Amino acid sequence: MSIFTNALSIAWKDLYSEWKTRQVLTTMIIFAGLVIVVCSFAFDPTNNTTKAVIPGAIWIIIVFSGILGLNRSFVSEQKNDNMHALLTAPLDAASIYLGKFLANFIMLLIVEIVAIPFLFLLFDFREMGSFPYFILVLFIGSFGFVAIGTFLAALAANSRSSEMLLPIMLFPLVSPILIGAVQATKIILTNIDKLPNAISWIQLIGGYNVIFFVLCVLLFEYVLEV
Amino acid sequence: MIQTKQLIKRVGDKVILRGVNLSIKEGQTVAILGPNGAGKSTILKVIATLIKPSSGEVLINNKEIKKHALEVKSLIGYLPHASLLYDHFTPLENLILFGKLYGVKDVEKRAKELIEKVGLSFFLHEPVKSFSRGMIQRVAIARAIVHEPRIILLDEPHTGLDQQAIVILNKVILEMKAQGTTTVMVTHDFKQAAEICDRIIIVKNGKIVDDFMLENNNLDLVFDKYALLTEGVV
């Protein structure tokens, strides 16, 4: 069996388990909804300056609801020592990482698909500079965040205070992605004339993603070692 | 089939294994006995590639497990204390998942066969979380042998099982034994060890203190040797 076939089996297992329990995704979506509702109370949607808040609000939703999902990703494998079953199976460590990454990424994309239109609706946000670029920024920003987050979630899972440890380790590493993604989103949503600047930010995120994704795949077996 | 050479495992200052040398031939059924904390489960975990020894090496089929990890793992079926099953999945879903990960061909057919073998055909589509300990252990046994391993490692497999589950477990082990599968079983249940196994290894303080062949299911011999070596009385 190839690494990718095994990764797909593991991703399917996580998503199917989520479909049956509806624990993580529901929590993520409820959290995203709460952030949006609180933001809509705090900022007057009729005020034009409020539009500047939207890029930040989008990435607050992605980061914090993403962390909720990442935290559960490996902790859920501890209940019946399920991780031991994966470790004793003839699987490359990379396939475990890729499977987990894929499941986390799909769940985060689902949250974005539900939450971002709701955010636009409550803030009455209609004019968008470039929809394809907006989707591209969301995609690569989320990709990098989940790639690094999945790796660190595995590292933090063995700690008693994994829920605290993960954000502490994650934020310094993903800050270049977050800075780039917020800046690019702001330009694309509110100031499309500066698109070349947004493209520079996207390139930065892309390069960062490639380096860290490859590193995470290569180093994951050391994270799993006891 | 299984060879360990000067296996040492340290955790912090504590030495769990102190130079374990083992040689188990293909088809043997071996029980590892010993008091709590003797290092029995650690030996099993090292062979199962779950933990790395501090020093020493393990050879399976003359292949070093670090260098040939994937090949070695596909030969081993591991059944520890925990079931390793996904609670929300049915027995069929669990076995199909693990069958796929082990590259089993016609995995659904194999999964159904095993579920029937462990007597849970009526619970094929019930989630494992609704099962009793005995039923979970039966599914766990099926999971451990889904890929028809050449070696099975069992960590206290009889603990908490009802009589029916014990009979099924012993039947599965003896069937595997008849097919030439090598079995290593850590247990505190001397009766089951004497019934199933043809070799007994006694471990104390991380060392093998006795290693003998068992004939005619001689339970008294096991009791006597164990008492002498671990408690110093006959």
Image: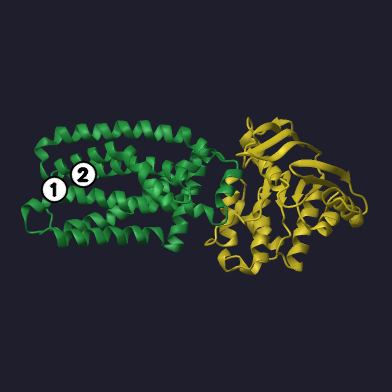
Chain to which mark 2 belongs: A
State the colouring used for the structure image.
by chain
Residue neighbourhood size for the residue with mark 2, other residues' Cα within 10 Å, grouped as few (<14), some (14–19), many (≥20): some
Residue under the image location 63 percent in, 30 percent down: B67
User: Which image quadrant: the C terminus of chain A?
Assistant: top right
Q: Amino acid at mark 2?
A: Phe
Whether pointer 2 and pointer 1 mark residues with C-beta atoms closer than 8 Å, the reply is yes
Q: Between residues B50 and B37, which one lies in front from this camera angle?
A: B37
Q: Position of residue A128 (x, y in %)?
A: 13, 48
Name the residue tied to disc 1.
Answer: A128
| Chain B, chosen colour in render | yellow
Q: Position of residue A144 (x, y in %)?
A: 33, 39
Q: Earlier in the sequence, mark 2 or mark 1?
A: 1
User: Which image quadrant: the N terminus of chain A?
Assistant: top right
Residue under the image location 63 percent in, 68 percent down: B132
Secondary structure state at the residue bearing disc 2: helix
Q: Position of residue A76 (x, y in %)?
A: 48, 54
| Chain A, chosen colour in render | green
Name the residue tied to disc 2.
Answer: A134
User: Dividing the picture into quarters, in which one does residue A120 lie?
Assistant: bottom left
Residue under the image location 51 percent in, 35 percent down: A222
Q: Between residues A184 and B189, which one lies in front from this camera angle?
A: B189
